[in-house]
Image: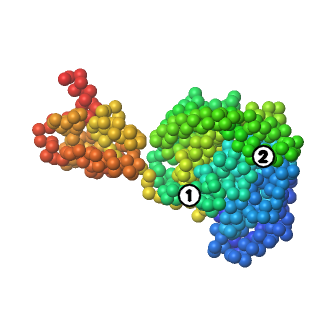
C-alpha cells in the first residue's frame, strides 16, 4: 500500500471502502518502521493503543468527524492524556490526565494521534539539534538540519508518516522547519489557539502551530483547533470579521510588502536570494502589487526577543525545575535559559516602551499592504556548522521570524519551490492579528501556482479539494476612479492617502467623455462629462482602492456639483468614479484636448 496521506485522498479512500481507520493503523506502523529514524519520536503509541483510537473513530462514523481517521503527530511539549510529556527532557517528564485543548478538539473531530515528536529541548531553538533523543533526519539531505524547535513534527509530515502535526511557535518554530521540509506552517494569531496543556516557553508569546501538506489542509486543522478557551488566561475571542475567509481572487489586486533591497539579509547565502526573487514574481503574477517597505521596525522587534528581557520568560518557565535538575538541561539550552535570570525589572519596562514604539511603526506599514512577504529563513545550515557555532547560527535563522508574536501578527509559511542545490525554499506571509484567513487565501493560490510535491513524499499536489478551498468572501476593498484634484501630486490626494487609499493603476477612460475646468472652485477642480461615443476623448484617470468604510466616508464628503457615477475605461471595464452635474458645466472651459487634468495644470502654470 503506497498512497498520500493528504486529507482528500484519505476521505476518498474511506468513502470508497478501500480503507478504514483500523487498516490505516498497520500502514502507519509500517511506514514509521520503514522510515527508520527513531529520532523523529520521543513516544510512539503502540499498535494496540492506535487501534483503540481508530475503533473509537469508526464507531462514531465520518458524518460528525471532519478529520475522520486522519493520523497526526503531537510535539512533545503538548499534552496527550495518559502519555508522558517531556519537552525533550526525560527528567522533566509528567503524565497529564487530560489532553491540551487543541489536542482534545482534534480527537473530537476524529483525528488519530500517532505519537509525541522530538524537539529542541524546552522548545528553545530553531535548529532541531538540541535534544538528548538525537536529531531527526532532514528528508532532503541527511547532513542538513531539520529545523526546530518542532523538528520531529515537521519531519513526520514531510516523510509521509502522518497527515499533519502540531508544533509550537514562539520565535519561528512552526515556520523554519516548514521551509526546511517543504511544508506549510501556520503560526496563528496569538490567542486563537488555546495554549492550555502546553509546556510554556515564553507564555505571553507562545502559539500552537500546524504543519500540513497544503494550505487548505492546514486551514482545515486550524479552524478546528482555534476558538476561545475561557480556561486559558491568554486565549482571546476572534472578532466577527476574522471569520470571513478570502481568496486571492477576492483580493485582486492585493498589495504585498517586501523589504528594501538593502534591508534583506542573507548571511552570505547566494542561492536563497534567487529563490526569493522568483517568489516575488510569483505573487506579482497572481495580481499582487509589490510595495517596498521599511523593515526596520520588524527587524528591531525581532532582536528584542533574545537580546531583550523576554528571555526571562523562558527562565520563569523552568526555573523551579532548573533549581533541582540543572544538569539535566541540554548544555546550549541551559546557557540560553540561564541568561533569563539576569534582566532587571527596569530592563523589562524599558523594553516594553521600545516595543510599543516599534508596534506603532509596524502598524503604519499595514495601512499600505495586505500582507508582508519575507523569506522564511535566509539560509540553511549543516548539522556540523550548527555544532561548531550553535548560538550565532540559530539566531540567524530567526532574523525573519522572531518579531511575529511580539508585534502580534499572524503568519503563514508556504513552500516556494526548490533552490538550485535541491533544498526546499519557503516564504512567509505576515499580516496583522486576525488576518489568518486572508493569508490562507493568498498562500493557497501561491502554493498551487508554484508547488510541485507534498513534503518529501514525491507525491504531487492533489487536485483542489474541499479541504484546499478557501471560500470566497466579499471584496475587502473598493475601487474609485479620480480625475482631478485627487490625482497623485494634486492638492486633495491626501483625502485618499489619509484614509488608507492605494493606487491601483493609471489609465484612461473610453473616448466618450469631455473634461471641463470648473469656475470658482477652491482648489481648482475639473468636471467630467459623459457624451455620445465618438464625440468625446479618452481622459487620464487614476484608479484607487479603499476599504469599504473609508470608501463610504470619502464619497459622503464629496461636495456638489461633483458626484460618483459609473465610468467606462478604455479596456472596457467599468469603475465608480467622479462625474459632474450638467448645470455646473455652464460657463466652464472645455479642456478635453489636454487629455487630462495634470496636463492642463502644467500648461496653465507655464502659460498663466
Instruction: Please say if the residues under marks 2 and 1 sit with CB atoms less than 8 Å apart.
Output: no
Mark nearest the camera among 2 and 1 is 2
Foreground residue, 482 or 229?
229
Quarter in which the N terminus is drawn: bottom right
Mark number, residue 556: none
**500 and 100: which is toward the camera:** 100
Give the percent coordinates (x, y) of residue 561. 19, 45
Residue located beneath label 2 in the image? 318
Q: Which residue is mark 1?
A: 237
> In the picture provided, is 286 more to the left or to the right than 127?
left
Q: Is residue 573 left or right of residue 143?
A: left
Decide if residue 164 is in sight here: no
Position of residue 151 in the picture relative to residue 452 (left or right): right
Q: CA distance from mark 2 to mark 1?
A: 29 Å
Picture layout, residue 602 above or below residue 511? above
In the image, farthest residue toward the front? 345
65 or 506, nearer to the observer? 65
Q: Vertical placement of 451 versus 33: above or below?
A: above
| SS under mark 1 | loop
Q: Dot 2: within a 10 Å radius of its alpha carbon, few (fewer than 14), some, or many (20 or more) residues? A: many
Q: Residues within 10 Å of mark 1 (few under 14, many from 20)?
A: few
Q: Residue at x 22, y 34 (%)?
A: 522
Q: Quadrant of residue 422?
A: top right
The residue shown at (74%, 63%) is 99
What residue is at 69 percent from the left and 76 percent from the top?
60
Task: Check disc 2 and report its element: helix, strand or loop.
Answer: helix
Picture quarter with the C terminus: top left
Q: Position of residue 268 (x, y in %)?
A: 69, 28
Of all residues, the one furthest to the left in this rendering is 587
Q: Nearer the viewer, residue 162 or 92?
A: 92
| Observer able to see residue 59 | yes
Amino acid at each position: 500500500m503506497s498512497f498520500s496521506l493528504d486529507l482528500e485522498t484519505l476521505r476518498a479512500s474511506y468513502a470508497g471502502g478501500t480503507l478504514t481507520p483500523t487498516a490505516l493503523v498497520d500502514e502507519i506502523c509500517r511506514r514509521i518502521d520503514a522510515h527508520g529514524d527513531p529520532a523523529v519520536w520521543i513516544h510512539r503509541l503502540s499498535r494496540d493503543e492506535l487501534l483503540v483510537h481508530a475503533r473509537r473513530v469508526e464507531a462514531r462514523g465520518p458524518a460528525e468527524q471532519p478529520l475522520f481517521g486522519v493520523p497526526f503527530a503531537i510535539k512533545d511539549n503538548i499534552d496527550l492524556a495518559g502519555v508522558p510529556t517531556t519537552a525533550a527532557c526525560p527528567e522533566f517528564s509528567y503524565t497529564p490526565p487530560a489532553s491540551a485543548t487543541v489536542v482534545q478538539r482534534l480527537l473530537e473531530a476524529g483525528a488519530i494521534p500517532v505519537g509525541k515528536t522530538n524537539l529542541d529541548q524546552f522548545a528553545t531553538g530553531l535548529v532541531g539539534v538540541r535534544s538528548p533523543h538525537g536529531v531527526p533526519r532532514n528528508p532532503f539531505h541527511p547532513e542538513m538540519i531539520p529545523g526546530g524547535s518542532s523538528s520531529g513534527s515537521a519531519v513526520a509530515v514531510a516523510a509521509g508518516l502522518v497527515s499533519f502535526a502540531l508544533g509550537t511557535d514562539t520565535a519561528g518554530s512552526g515556520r523554519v522547519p516548514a521551509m526546511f521540509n517543504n511544508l506549510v506552517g501556520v503560526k496563528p494569531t496569538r490567542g486563537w489557539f488555546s495554549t492550555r496543556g502546553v509546556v510554556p516557553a515564553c507564555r505571553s508569546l507562545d502559539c500552537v502551530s500546524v504543519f500540513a501538506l497544503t494550505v487548505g489542509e492546514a486551514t482545515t486543522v486550524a479552524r478546528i483547533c482555534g476558538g476561545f478557551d475561557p480556561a486559558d488566561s491568554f486565549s482571546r475571542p476572534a472578532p466577527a470579521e476574522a471569520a470571513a475567509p478570502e481568496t486571492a481572487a477576492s483580493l485582486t489586486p492585493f498589495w504585498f510588502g517586501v523589504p528594501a533591497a538593502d534591508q534583506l539579509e542573507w548571511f552570505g547565502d547566494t542561492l536563497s536570494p534567487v529563490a526569493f526573487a522568483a517568489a516575488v514574481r510569483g505573487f506579482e503574477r497572481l495580481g499582487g502589487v509589490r510595495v517596498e517597505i521599511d523593515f526596520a521596525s520588524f527587524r528591531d522587534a525581532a532582536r528584542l526577543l533574545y537580546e531583550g528581557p523576554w528571555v526571562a520568560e523562558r527562565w520563569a518557565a523552568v526555573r523551579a525545575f532548573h533549581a533541582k535538575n540543572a544538569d539535566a538541561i541540554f548544555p546550549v539550552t541551559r546557557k540560553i535559559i540561564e541568561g533569563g535570570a539576569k534582566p532587571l525589572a527596569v530592563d523589562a519596562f524599558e523594553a516594553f516602551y521600545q516595543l510599543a514604539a516599534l508596534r506603532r511603526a509596524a502598524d503604519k506599514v499595514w495601512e499600505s499592504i495586505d500582507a508582508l512577504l519575507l523569506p522564511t529563513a535566509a539560509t540553511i545550515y549543516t548539522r556540523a556548522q550548527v555544532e561548531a557555532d550553535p548560538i550565532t547560527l540559530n539566531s540567524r535563522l530567526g532574523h525573519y521570524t522572531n518579531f511575529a508574536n511580539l508585534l502580534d501578527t499572524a503568519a503563514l509559511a508556504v513552500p516556494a519551490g526548490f533552490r538550485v542545490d535541491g533544498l526546499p525554499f519557503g516564504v512567509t506571509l505576515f499580516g496583522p492579528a486576525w488576518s489568518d484567513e486572508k493569508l490562507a487565501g493568498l498562500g493557497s493560490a501561491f502554493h498551487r501556482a508554484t508547488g510541485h510535491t507534498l513534503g518529501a513524499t514525491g507525491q504531487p499536489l492533489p487536485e483542489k479539494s474541499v479541504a484546499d478551498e478557501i471560500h470566497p468572501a466579499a471584496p475587502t476593498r473598493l475601487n474609485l476612479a479620480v480625475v482631478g484634484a485627487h490625482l497623485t501630486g494634486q492638492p486633495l490626494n491626501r483625502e485618499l492617502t489619509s484614509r488608507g487609499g492605494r493606487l491601483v493603476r493609471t489609465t484612461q477612460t473610453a473616448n466618450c467623455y469631455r473634461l471641463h475646468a470648473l469656475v470658482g472652485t477652491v482648489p481648482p477642480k475639473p468636471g467630467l462629462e459623459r457624451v455620445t461615443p465618438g464625440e468625446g476623448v479618452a481622459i487620464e484617470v487614476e484608479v484607487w482602492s479603499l476599504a469599504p468604510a473609508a470608501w463610504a466616508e470619502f464619497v459622503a464628503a464629496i461636495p456638489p456639483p461633483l458626484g460618483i457615477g459609473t465610468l467606462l475605461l478604455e479596456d472596457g471595464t467599468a469603475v465608480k468614479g467622479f462625474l459632474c452635474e450638467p448645470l455646473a458645466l455652464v460657463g466652464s472651459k472645455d479642456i478635453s484636448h489636454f487629455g487630462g487634468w495634470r496636463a492642463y495644470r502644467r500648461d496653465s502654470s507655464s502659460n498663466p
